[in-house]
Amino acid sequence: MSEHVMPTYGRLDIAFVSGEGAWLTDDKGNRYLDGLSGLGVVGLGHAHPRVSNAIAAQSSILLHTSNLYRIPSQERLADRLAEISGMDNMFFCNSGAEANECAIKIARLYGHNRGIETPTIIVIDAAFHGRTLATLTATGNRKVQAGFEPLVGGFVRAPFNNVEAIENIARNNNNIVAIMLEPIQGEGGIQVPDENYLSRLRALCDESGWFLILDEVQSGNARTGSYFAYQQAGIVPDLLTTAKGLANGLPIGVCMARGEAAKVFAPGNHGSTFGGNPLACAAAAAVIDEIEEKDLAERAGQLGDRMRQNFEQRLGALNNVREIRGKGLMIGIELDQPCGELVQKAMAKGLLLNVTADSVIRLLPPLIISDDEADQICEIVCSLVESL
Ligand SMILES: *Cc1c(COP(=O)(O)O)cnc(C)c1O
């Protein structure tokens, strides 16, 4: 491994050279079933022809002009995302953290416009929002923050899945402008809140004049059974971010705003050199076309239910299995012990998976996997857990 790459990741000593669908091939010719999709990014699988063709075609015409000029493909993508999400307008950037930075800036500026000098955002225990200074502050994991103090001001923290705790914070703090959360926590261990959690937070935000900011960087783009996870709760946020699966691997992020939140920014308030460039927007448009034509959101919902049922049947009664949870193809199996070693053991059996929050096996397979591939994933994961 080159010493010229900063050691920010404890990388596994394996290098993939090509992929097709749900499969990756390493430089020794070994094939692996991808149960992780590059951390929830390649929802359509590897080397998807529709996306490859869109990227090839756009790259041979025009890559970049900057946001000093109109970008028709960006406008078209914004129109499509508005139609899908119910949001009014959007800002394009290049990553999830940047999308969240944009949402945080809108909430703060909205506060200042209303005479709140220290606008404060409620964030949640075990949340993950990114690695920039503001987003690592919003993240509820000391490991992500330690050593990078002073953290950014203007955040207060509440426990997960607890509306009363948030009401209590509100009673003692006149500076709150927003609540920011993931509808399903990803890095925090695939934590799914109670059925009515989002609608209760929506009502609280409406009563209090706060923005509801949903981070769907991981849960968005058809992964949980609907294009965005909040759509299953029958609510709409004021600010919505997504990134990972939006363009199947080309870097892109977006912050969407609705109602009052859509009226906050004016020219000069925010920007991005690369954000919303023709190449990234062409890839994202191709991804959305494919998701819609093939009903991949619905497919992810059904296949996810089936996989969780399989896991429940085979693992549910084991003493070392705490809980099997998730929505759609965002699946977590929590064990009663740290299980990081399963990543290597799964790789030895030809499956890529991830362990998050120390003891949660996380699966984010491509949305295009076949029933048979889903069964293969279940079989390998079950045999690994049984052998622990
Ligand atoms: C991955 C992730 C982020 C950060 O996205 P980057 O593209 O790595 O900056 C933010 N929020 C959630 C929920 C994520 O899963």
Image: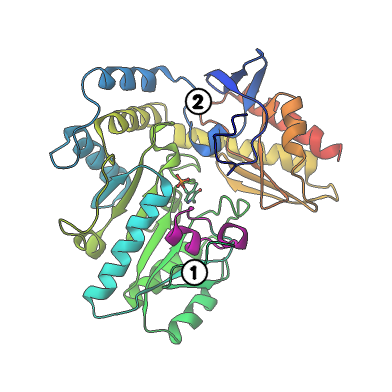
User: Is residue 134 magenta-colored?
Assistant: yes
**Which residues are drawn in magenta?**
128-146
Q: Secondary structure at mark 2?
A: loop
Is residue 236 visible to the viewer in this orientation of the structure? Answer: no
Q: Which amino acid, by three-letter code, is at mark 1?
A: Pro
Bin the neighbour count of mark 1 within 10 Å (Cα to Cα): few under 14, some 14-19, many 20 and up. Answer: few
Looking at the rendered image, the disc whose residue lies closer to the viewer, 1 or 2, is 1
Count of numbered tags: 2
**Most extreme residue toward the bottom, as rendered?**
172
Tell me the quadrant of the picture where the N terminus can be found: top right
Distance between the alpha carbons at the discs numbered 1 and 2: 40 Å
Which numbered circle lies on residue 45? 2
In this picture, is 61 found above or below 203?
above
**Most extreme residue toward the top, as rendered?**
29
**Most extreme residue toward the front, as rendered?**
3
Residue 103 horizontal side relative to residue 151, left or right: left
Q: Which amino acid, by three-letter code, is at mark 2?
A: Gly
Query: Does any atom of ligand 1 lie closer than 8 Å to the CB of label 1?
Result: no
Q: Secondary structure at mark 1?
A: loop
**Residue in the picture at 44% in, 31% down:** 249
- Residue 313 at what x, y percent from top left? 76, 40
Residue under numbered circle 1:
150
- Residue 59 at what x, y percent from top left? 28, 21
Bin the neighbour count of mark 2 within 10 Å (Cα to Cα): few under 14, some 14-19, many 20 and up. Answer: many
